[in-house]
Image (tube, coloured by chain):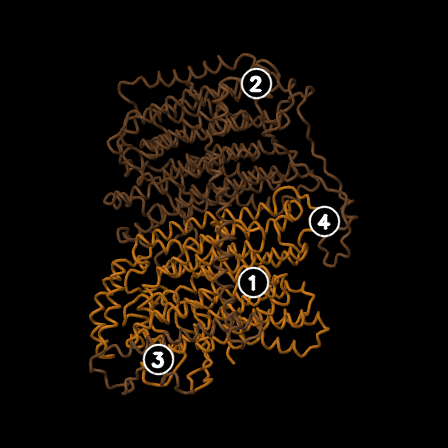
Chain colours: A brown, B orange
Amino acid sequence: MDNFGLIWLVIGLPVAGFLIQALVGKRLIGNGSGKRLVGALAVAPIAAAFALAVVVTINLTTLAPGTREFVSAGWDWIKIAGLNVPFELRIDPLTMLMTLIITGIGALIHLYATGYMAEEKDYARFFTYLNLFIASMLMLVLGNNLVMLFIGWEGVGLCSYLLIGFWYKDLANAKAANKAFIVNRIGDWGLTLGMFLLFVVIAANADKFGAHEDRFLSYDVFLPVIGEILKEMPGVTTAIALLLFVGACGKSAQFPLYLWLPDAMAGPTPVSALIHAATMVTAGVFLLNRLYVIFELSPIASAVIACVGAFTALFAALVAFGQTDIKKVLAYSTVSQLGFMFVACGAGAYWVGMFHVTTHAFFKALLFLGSGAVIHAMAHNQDMRNYGKLRKYLPITFWTMMIGFVAIAGVPPFAGFFSKEGILGYALANSHATAGGVNFSYIVGWVGLAVALLTAFYMTRMTMLTFFSGDERWKLIPAHSEGHDAHEHHAHHASHEDHGPDRHGFFFTQEQLDAEPEVHEHHHDLDESHKPHEVPFSMWFPLVALAILSIGGGYLLNNNHLLEHWLYPPGTQVLSLEAHPHGIPLEALSIGAAVLGILLGLAFYLKKLPIKEGWDLAKWNPFRTLAGNQFGYDNAMVAATVDGGRDLGLAMWQGADAKVVDGAVNGSGWTAGKLGDFFGRIQNGFVRQYALVMLIGVVGLLGAIGYSISKGLDAPPENTRPVGNVPSQAAPSVSPAFGEGR
Amino acid sequence: MGLLSLIVFLPLIGAILLMLLPKEQEKTHKWLALGFSVATFAASLALIPKFTAENFHFQLVESIPWIKSLGISYSLGLDGISFWLILLTTFLSVISFWFSFYIEKRVKLYFICLLILETAMLGVFVSLDMILFYTFFEASLVPMWLLISIWGGERRTYAGLKFFIYTFAGSIFMLVGMIVLANLYAKATGGPISFNIVDIQREVANGKLWAQAMQMQPWIFWSFAVAFLVKCPAFPFHTWLPDAHVEAPTAGSVILAGVLLKMGTYGFLRFCLPLFPDTIGKQVPIIMTLAVIGIIYGAIVASVQPDWKKLVAYSSVSHMGFVLLGIFSLTHTGLMGGAMQQLNHGISTGALFLLIGLVYERRHTRMFKNFGGLKAQMPIYSAIFLIVMLSSVGLPGTNGFIGEFMALMGAFESAYAGAFGLSMWFVVVAGFGVVLAAVYLLYMFQQVFYGKNDNPENQRLKDIKPWEMAMCGLLVVFIFWGGLYPNTFLKPMEASLGAARMMAINPTGTRPVWSDDAHQIDEQMNLVSDGKIIAPANLHYPLKEEITAKEAKLKEVEEWRRVVAGSTTASGDNWNLIAEGNK
């Protein structure tokens, strides 16, 4: 039975949820009693969408591999001559994999958020954004053309912006939100140009699409043919691939556009888990998979992708050492893992990229939610220097986070091991990403192995600082103030001056203001008496579910090429790749890297930390300071763009615009005035000065035109002037014509 | 009296009625004026069923001789280019009148000005006679000037005068151009002089009008273009706009941004594209360069403004740059995008000024330093503002995206900016304007809505009232309508814009010709059948085919010209240049 139409419900339910939250959410909450209802209304559409997505996926499996593609038509979105972008949804293995991740993990994170945000005043606003995010992300993956992808692409960017700035009263959050949106927009700039170039190429070859000609921008029409077309123009192919990759860099936080992701941790932790770890940031990898036929045609672009990925992975792993904020460690770890995914895509093994997307979604969502539980338990303090020995207080969080930790470290048989080993294997074994005779694939493979070691190391550091390492440190020192995931403080100042009668009813009167109760948020600082408490069911259940996925997910998906053949049935990819390098004992090496990293971490961080000098900062202090500052990159970029941009803007406004451009205007008025004085005919007055300028201008123009006309009419020297309509005297000037009828 | 005349003059009738009433009855004035604007809007809605989208010819034509000896007539007509602008004007007028209930100073004069302004604006968009167009074009200046200089802010006198004189100085060139065109028409036909653009375009299309005056064509083009560039406004003619916007009362700003600027882009579509086919190819790079500079320059200057309204004013410079870029890409996609973008700019920037006005009425300040943290104070207002701002950012799903995207894509495809490569670089740079739009608009949002609300004046602010919400809600509906189903807006414009484009780029003999009589459509020239545009070449991607077609026609044209005009030199050179430029 064909039930692919359900896909409209999969995307429609989150949209409905969003509308409910936006329009009536606040009213439903009332004075706080309706929070459970609103929470349920937020989770239910996502969970239902997941259930429907499962149904659709099962339906898809009944079709033969290679024919698993279905397009459900909606309406004409942009339809003019020569450009037809219909609004239609696409179902295929890749979209359904992403849909399952988005709705499945999304539902778990929504459930978690109902607990995490329980004390939040703007509960409905939070779920408004969160539901809209799910809808946008589904649009991104389900849309059947690049323009629809772009709706989702910018839509998730918007939701990310709104959620990072959720606690907007702190201007730092608002700035982080702006940074995220703007840096993403730089990526979108590349994506747009790549899209244009691709569209122009497609449109120029529209005749190759036969009957489908008028909707040639749809994936199902152009993807099967585009490879043939682009084969003959390698330069254009590389340009398209690199421009699209700029977009992927922005969304997937690759160097040099990764800057926004660490700052994005200013948002509530469920947001970090959902958007900045599990789903949105993987959109770039999705894009590469979606258009792999283009990327695999360009070895140069592939080499660039692989190198950028490897460099980002290494860079972010190093920076992760300098972080004291638990979420920042996870943020850089996300950037680093995304680098791995791009290494896979650069090496040509697109499916492994998606495999790592999947396993990463499991364990990184788990780690983020776990960190959220820790933060929740520690009164919203995110500084690991104030943690220690928490395993005693948070058993469920501890055990689930341990699973996430070994999964990301790459210990078999946990999920991360399989995908990471797959990436390294493909990178070392193949030579797709070869540019200028250098096999970058091989190089980035070894870099990746080193990063795997570093990953195990810094993750051990994080785990040890949080759950082990000697003392319960929050009892020993005052809370570090940085990285405070502060709940908003709502306060009304009671004293106002009287502003006289309020005619339009714009303002609250003094009585109304006094009547409004001051809101005291539940909030306390860390001190000796603080006793961490385990999180409620709504929060630990997602942890357990994700832990189970992190244990078995990798093995199950890897077994019998399950995921590989689901995404790319044998024979669909042009490239033929080796999965394992010859002569390199890769499994032993990658297990060795993981174990060595963990052992190193244990050696440094299992013991008690020195109390003075800011805890573990004492070790390798210069390096840590550098790494903590991202080796100065962020500061340099801020200085160059924000400060430099402001200076440029001010110079252009106060210098060029006011003095030069406008100066010319006012100057002409002034000149006219002086001229007027000179002639003594015109009294003071702006209008007249300008009028004079106008008059001079008009006279000048008339003169020029008259001259040009007379020249034009004089020009043809031949004596073959037609007898017809033109006045026979061959007027040398325009005067008769102007005079006519006056 | 035809429907178009009714729409155009209904506000004027209202103005005359208002003049007769004693000025003490402020309430009556307000309601009567609003009533007339609503009636005008209702009358303009009646255009929707009467308008045929498949036809690029003028419809609902009314023509009465006015000054016969001078060839000036009272001719009105509606086509796809003007259709939405009429509706935009009447719609935004209702909103502006509605908002103007706040006005307390010299109410009678204020509403008379607004009503006259509405008539002038509507007249511009439906005039088929150039002198009539010019009359309305200039007539719109006076009420706007009064609005700025009487009800404006602190520097209102300076701003009002600057607005008036600057735009007037620009359009005087256009008048000269019009007179020359009319005389050339008389010369070409040997008949009486005519200012009717339908007549003139016919002679342009068959090549007769310019046959003897090829060197003049760029001059006349620029005499029109300068007027419209000032009106748009494009860099470097934009400096009147920030002053005018900042000082104008809210309704004035809404109309200024929403409609008056569109007169510039409308003028390009109505005059510059159809009437100068032999020179436009060479002028395109200049105008596109100005457009791109405007996009980037406006955005950079906007991002350092300390004044809320001034920021939006400079953002207009940037946004109108996209309109110009789209129109002068001379591709079908680009033209449609540019035309769409001008509607979007009317809706979104009009809405931005309206929303700023709502707060200005409460706080009487526009400086960012006086705001902050309004999001908690006015949640509904800030939500609406967010939506409008995002439309201005060009977020997909809102109308702003459709126009910007299509304009940029059209410019990318364009072969007419000299060379393909150059055109691509225009887009690469202009695309960065989209990034900068996010920079200055998010900065604006942050300044006003984020952070702590620690100004006691702001802590007493109430959220907007239901009728204000309704007013803004109307605009928000169009933001999403345009974003999710833009075909509503694109379809009626398509035939006319396609024709305008072919008038500009097709070689002589294949250019479409307007008809002001819907029953006498030349079947040969009717480009539209079954709702599809039949293009002489590949409409979408006009590179090779059209150029070949042009070159093929070249000889034919030459022969024909020789017979008609007896001139071989001027026209021949010109054609070769265009052909070379396109290679």
Neighbor class of circle 1 (other Cα within 10 Å; few <14, some 14-19, many 20+) is many
Which residue is disc 4 drawn over? Answer: B460
Looking at the picture, does residue B127 appear above or below residue B398?
below
A459 vs A146, left or right, is right
What chain letter is assigned to the residue under label 3? Answer: B
Q: CA distance from mark 4 to mark 2?
A: 47 Å
Q: Which mark is residue A615?
A: 2
From the image, tell me which residue sits under label 1: B244
Q: Three-letter amino acid code at disc 4?
A: Arg
Q: What separation in Å lies between label 1 and label 2 (alpha carbons)?
A: 60 Å
- Across and down, in percent, residue A77 comes to 43, 54
Give the Cα distance between marks 3 and 4.
65 Å
Q: Residue A463: horizontal and vertical position, in percent?
A: 52, 19
Image quarter (top left, top right, bottom left or bottom right) of the C terminus of chain B: bottom left
Q: CB under 8 Å between callouts 1 and 3? A: no
Q: Distance of mark 1 from mark 4, alpha carbons?
A: 30 Å
Give the mark toward the camera: 1 or 2.
1
Q: Mark 2: which amino acid?
A: Trp
Which of the pair B85/A736 is nearer the observer?
A736
The numbered disc on residue B185 is: 3
Q: On what subunit does the disc labeled 4 rest?
A: B
Q: Quadrant of residue A284?
A: top left
B249 above or below A99? below
Measured in 3D between alpha carbons, the distance from the residue under mark 1 to the one under mark 3, in whole angstroms, is 38 Å
Marks 3 & 4 on one chain: yes
Q: Nearer the viewer, mark 1 or mark 3?
A: 1
The amino acid on which the numbered mark 3 sits, given as a three-letter code, is: Tyr
Marks 1 and 2 on same chain = no
